[in-house]
Structures are given as structure tokens and as C-alpha cells.
Image (cartoon, coloured by chain):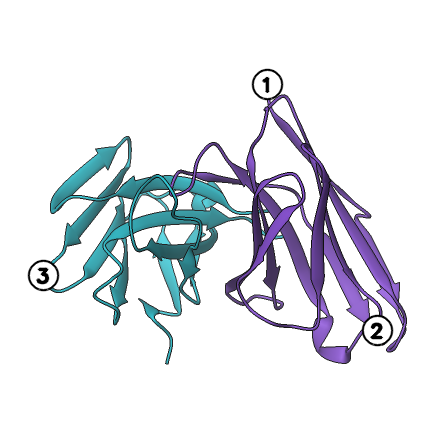
């Protein structure tokens, strides 16, 4: 069975500090991977997607970057956090593009 | 402008009742629709997809798509308190292959009261 793990579960960071969030998918080879951002109680905004190791496409610019260093790992990062980065970050995977996306449990980020 | 619009923003139904959620796309390129459900503090989970005109039924859930008007609805019969959640409509330009972008609506908050 496939499992998706996100770390950390929650993070409180200062404005201007760096950030790194991680996501690991086990039990599925070469999945498509996605990062989403969700404001509290708000809609889901797709940020990045990746179809293979080392290849990441940006969907929207929010002063964030993403990388896929391994087949089963997706990293979201920034060197300088803004207040507007606060929210819920979700990683997801799909078998193929256009198919059902399976979401992880998310990371709650608070920027003060 | 929000390309995927949902209504109502919130909805309260009694246990055992019918909940009806609506979604409309303003982008004619969006032809493929999904319904996702998110319980508080968790990641969303797909309920069902609908790509063809008409109805699609899965258990207590029925989705209806009208491609001409780009309107999709979700009906939940015999609603249960466990159905209380945020429901998202999501749309994409095509259903398979190289499509990776999914656009979500703002969601409908459903509360089922015992």
C-alpha cells in the first residue's frame, strides 16, 4: 500500500527565516508529485508539480521553490519567509497526470 | 476571477437529509471535474470524478455534469454527521496523459446536524 508522509507536522517560523518542508511517498514507483498551499479554511492552490526526478514545474509564483532529489521525495523551500506564507502545505501524488491525486496529512506553517 | 466557483459557501442539513452542492467553471477549457472532501486538519480525499454529461452514482453520492453549461453538482443522500467537511470542486483541462494542473474552487462547508 502507498503511504505519504510529510514533515514536519507543524512549524512556527519568523519572518525572513528559511524554510524546508518535506514529503515522501512509499510504495509507488515514479509517481507524479504536487505541492499545494491552503489558507486557513480556504481553497487549495497548486504550487508545483514534478513528473520525474530533478524536474519541477512551477504553477504559481509565491517566492517558494521546490526540488525532487529522489524518486520518492519532494522538497518545498524558501530562503526568506513572508507573513503571507502562513497556511497549510499539502503534498500529493498521482499515478498519472489527470488522475486522482492522493494527499498527505499536511504541514501547518505559522509565520510570525 | 475565480475559474471554479462553488455554492453555497456553507450548508447545514439534518442527519438523514439530502445535501446539494454546486460548482460552475468560467473556463471552457475545463471539461473534467472532481469532487474532493476535506475533514478538519486533514488532507483532502477524492470522492469521485465525472468527465461525461449526465449522472454518476457512487453509494450515497451522485454527481451530475452538464458540459454545455460547465455546471457540476454533488448530491449526498442520507447525510451522516461524518459527512461534515469542506467539499471542493476541482477542474482540469483534460483527463489523462500530460495534464498535471488541477484548479480548485473555494469549497462548500457542509455541516450535518444530528
Determine which residue is flagged by label 3: B68
Question: What colour has chain B?
Answer: cyan
Subunit that carries the residue with mark 3: B
Any part of residue A51 in sight: yes
Relative to B35, say whether A40 is above or below: below
- Circle 2 Cα neighbour tier, 10 Å, few/some/many (<14 / 14–19 / ≥20): some
Residue B39: % across, % down = 55, 48
Residue sitting at 82 percent across and 56 percent down? A20
Determine which residue is flagged by label 2: A80
Which quarter of the rendering shows the N terminus of chain B?
A: bottom left
> Does residue B8 appear left or right of residue A92 in this picture?
left
Residue B75: % across, % down = 25, 48
Between the C-alphas of marks 3 and 2, the distance is 45 Å
- Circle 3 Cα neighbour tier, 10 Å, few/some/many (<14 / 14–19 / ≥20): few
Please tell me whether mark 2 or mark 1 is closer to you in this view.
2
Chain letter for the part of the structure drawn in purple? A
For the residue labelled by badge 2, is the local secondary structure a helix, a strand or a loop?
loop
Any part of residue B18 in sight: no
For the residue labelled by badge 3, is the local secondary structure a helix, a strand or a loop?
loop
Please tell me whether mark 3 or mark 2 is closer to you in this view.
2
The numbered disc on residue A1 is 1
Amino acid at each position: 500500500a502507498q503511504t505519504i508522509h510529510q514533515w514536519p507536522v507543524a512549524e512556527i517560523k519568523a519572518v525572513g527565516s528559511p524554510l524546508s518542508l518535506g514529503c515522501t511517498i512509499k510504495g509507488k514507483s515514479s509517481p507524479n508529485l504536487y505541492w499545494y498551499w491552503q489558507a486557513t479554511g480556504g481553497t487549495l492552490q497548486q504550487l508545483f508539480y514534478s513528473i520525474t526526478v530533478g524536474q519541477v514545474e512551477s504553477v504559481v509564483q509565491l517566492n517558494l521553490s521546490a526540488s525532487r532529489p529522489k524518486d520518492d521525495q519532494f522538497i518545498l523551500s524558501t530562503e526568506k519567509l513572508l507573513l503571507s506564507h502562513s497556511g497549510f502545505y499539502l503534498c500529493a501524488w498521482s499515478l498519472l497526470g489527470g488522475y486522482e491525486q492522493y494527499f498527505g496529512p499536511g504541514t501547518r506553517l505559522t509565520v510570525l | 476571477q475565480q475559474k471554479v466557483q462553488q455554492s453555497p459557501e456553507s450548508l447545514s442539513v439534518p442527519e438523514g437529509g439530502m445535501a446539494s452542492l454546486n460548482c460552475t467553471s468560467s473556463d471552457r477549457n475545463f471539461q473534467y471535474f472532481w469532487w474532493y472532501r476535506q475533514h478538519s486538519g486533514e488532507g483532502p480525499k477524492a470522492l469521485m470524478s465525472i468527465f461525461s454529461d449526465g449522472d454518476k452514482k457512487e453509494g450515497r453520492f451522485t454527481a451530475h455534469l452538464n458540459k454545455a453549461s460547465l455546471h457540476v453538482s454533488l448530491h449526498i443522500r442520507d447525510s451522516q454527521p461524518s459527512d461534515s467537511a469542506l467539499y471542493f470542486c476541482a477542474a482540469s483541462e483534460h483527463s489523462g496523459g500530460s495534464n498535471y494542473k488541477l484548479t480548485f474552487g473555494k469549497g462548500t462547508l457542509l455541516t450535518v446536524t444530528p
